[in-house]
């Protein structure tokens, strides 16, 4: 076999078997020069970022170049601007430059790296996507920016990366992601958002990334499972560990249970409230398939999963179940605990399970009696509600039926936010009218925005107080009239003039006749009897509410149009 034949045979071996074959010298000090799956690679690993690789010893046709200092040094050899010396490798497909204090990629450098498919700038000081000039690097399929200083992802930040399949932004300070941030990324299958400051995600945020298979939301500040997850039909692995999640919606359990794609769901180290609302989730955890998905979840390493299991999620409340593995619970136990799960107990706290780093106020519940079978919320009066005089016993009724409610007065009406959740829409309407009020009916966008701001204001108070008294949604005074084939106001039976439906809603009015308002302000049609209690809002005329407020004991911490029922003795509520 002559020299030419040997070379040809070697190249065939590389192409077919992807063998890692060492180059002939030269190769820079502290570097390994070889082939990775048939592609020429230089991997340089050294102690600190102060070390500079002699790039003249790297072949100009190298395809993969990894600069991997183990720590930051006194100076950074390749920061704060990524130097244009990397432009001497015109065929470069992968570039990794970690732990070098890099803040930006200059336009000139980016222009010489337009063939890049993989870019890893983990452990640097990048604050804004705009500083990376991704509109030039638009062939990137994998972008790793873990351990930088990003605080948000705007709607246009990732738009140029139409071929992106992998995005890693763990360990930043991200607290906001625009609803349209991932629009157009139709090939995105791996998304790592671990170790950030996220409290919520827009319900539509995942609508345009149908191929997403891996989602890591571990160690953020979520108080509920992001609603948009329900739409990810190919989702195989999702990590929600170490957040502040209290329950798992029954509709999400149903979707996961029937999904052929789901492999692992990480939910450990969340403050799960083990009441009857969690029963569908517990039932699933007790099946072989559910146990495998929920209780044999692989732990995460920096980028991939290992075979070590994290174990089943455990309860934090009620106290009798604190620390219990959900797969050991019985439905009878959950049923008996339900009477302890809707009213916020003053100053009641529990010790979190070992390994958790959060505290929160225990949410306790007192069930409402159900509405009478012959009850109808429709009044005889022509107006949206017929309250013209102050009832002498209204304060007593509020104390009985809506203890600890907050009263907010806006431009048009006053609103009474209930701390106690109910599972039936009719029961919410019944208790509003038992007090002399009505279940809230929102007349226009201004009123909708006012109510939404009241909700946000109360949420902020609860978060500052480290309390978790919020339901994911609240009943409102709108329902579907099957005979008329449109949505009507509860108190009048007339078609509603204003509507604020969420994305793809209403989805099933014939089967989901009642309406709830999500904590995002959007409306959703839903079954009139739910396994999970919803809060609700009662309304009065502005004059009625303001006069009522004058009879109440004032609380100096509230604004002139806000007050607490019962003299401000109880905690804030939704």
Image (cartoon, rainbow, N blue to C red):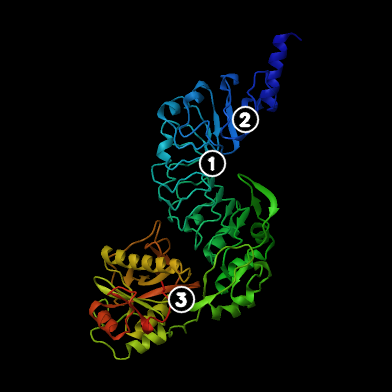
SS label for mark 2: strand
**Who is closer to the viewer here, 15 or 314?**
314
**Who is closer to the viewer here, 361 or 192?**
361
Give the residue drawn at x 51%, y 60%. Answer: 225
Ranked by sequence position, the earlier of labels 2 and 1 is 2
Give the residue drawn at x 50%, y 24%. Answer: 85
In the displayed image of the protein, which residue is found farthest to the front?
74
| Cα distance between the residues tagged 3 and 2 | 59 Å
Residue 256, x across and y down, in percent: 58, 58
Label 3 packing within 10 angstroms: few (<14), some (14-19), many (20+)? many
Q: Is residue 10 above or below residue 298?
A: above
The residue labelled by disc 2 is: 44
**Who is closer to the viewer here, 396 or 278?**
396
Disc marking residue 123: 1
Q: Is residue 46 above or below residue 167?
A: above
Q: Is residue 427 above or below residue 58?
A: below
| Cα distance between the residues tagged 3 and 1 | 45 Å
Give the residue drawn at x 47%, y 25%. Answer: 84
């Amino acid at each position: 076999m002559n020299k030419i034949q040997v070379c040809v045979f070697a190249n065939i071996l590389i192409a077919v078997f992807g063998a890692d074959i060492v180059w002939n010298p030269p190769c820079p000090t502290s570097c390994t020069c070889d082939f990775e799956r048939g592609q020429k690679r230089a991997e340089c690993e050294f102690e600190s970022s102060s070390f500079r690789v002699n790039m003249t010893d790297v072949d100009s046709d190298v395809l993969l170049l990894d600069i991997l200092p183990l720590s930051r040094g006194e100076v950074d050899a390749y920061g704060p601007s990524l130097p244009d010396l990397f432009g001497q490798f015109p065929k470069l497909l992968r570039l990794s430059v970690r732990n070098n204090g890099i803040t930006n990629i200059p336009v000139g450098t980016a222009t010489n790296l337009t063939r890049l498919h993989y870019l890893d700038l983990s452990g640097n000081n990048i604050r804004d996507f705009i500083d990376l000039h991704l509109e030039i690097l638009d062939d990137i399929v994998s972008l790793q920016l873990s351990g930088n200083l990003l605080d948000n992802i705007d709607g246009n930040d990732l738009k140029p990366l139409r071929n992106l399949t992998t995005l890693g932004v763990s360990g930043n300070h991200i607290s906001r992601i625009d609803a349209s941030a991932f629009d157009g990324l139709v090939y995105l299958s791996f998304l790592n958002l671990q170790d950030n400051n996220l409290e919520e995600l827009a319900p539509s945020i995942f609508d345009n990334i149908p191929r997403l298979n891996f989602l890591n939301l571990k160690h953020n500040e979520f108080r509920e499972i992001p609603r948009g997850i329900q739409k990810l039909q190919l989702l195989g692995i999702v990590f929600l560990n170490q957040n502040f999640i209290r329950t798992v919606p029954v509709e999400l359990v149903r979707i996961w249970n029937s999904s052929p794609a789901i492999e692992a769901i990480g939910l450990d180290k969340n403050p799960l409230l083990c009441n009857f609302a969690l029963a569908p989730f517990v039932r699933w955890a007790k099946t072989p398939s559910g146990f495998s998905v929920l209780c044999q979840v692989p732990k995460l390493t920096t980028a991939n999963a290992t075979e070590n299991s994290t174990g089943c999620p455990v309860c934090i409340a009620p106290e009798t179940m604190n620390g219990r593995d959900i797969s050991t619970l019985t439905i009878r136990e959950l049923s008996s605990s339900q009477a302890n799960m809707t009213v916020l107990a003053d100053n009641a706290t529990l010790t979190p399970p070992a390994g958790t780093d959060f505290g929160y106020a225990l949410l306790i519940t007192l069930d409402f009696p159900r509405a009478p079978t012959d009850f109808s919320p429709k009044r005889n009066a022509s107006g949206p509600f017929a309250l013209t005089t102050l009832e002498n016993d209204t304060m007593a009724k509020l104390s009985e039926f809506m203890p600890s409610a907050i009263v907010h007065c806006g431009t048009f009406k006053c609103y009474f936010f209930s701390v106690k959740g109910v599972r039936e829409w009719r029961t919410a309407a019944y208790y509003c009218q038992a007090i002399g009020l009505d279940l809230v009916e929102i007349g226009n966008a201004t009123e909708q925005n006012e109510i939404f701001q009241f909700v946000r204001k109360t949420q902020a108070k609860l978060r500052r107080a480290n309390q978790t008294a919020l339901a994911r949604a609240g009943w409102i005074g709108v329902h579907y009239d099957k005979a008329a084939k449109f949505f009507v106001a509860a108190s009048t039976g007339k078609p509603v003039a204003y509507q604020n439906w969420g994305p793809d809603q209403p989805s099933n009015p014939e089967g989901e006749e009642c309406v709830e308002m999500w904590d995002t302000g959007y409306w959703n049609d839903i079954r009139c009897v739910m396994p999970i209690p919803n809060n609700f809002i009662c309304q009065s005329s502005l004059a009625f509410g303001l006069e009522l407020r004058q009879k109440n004991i004032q609380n100096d911490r509230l604004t002139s149009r806000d007050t607490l029922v019962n003299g401000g003795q109880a905690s804030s509520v939704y």
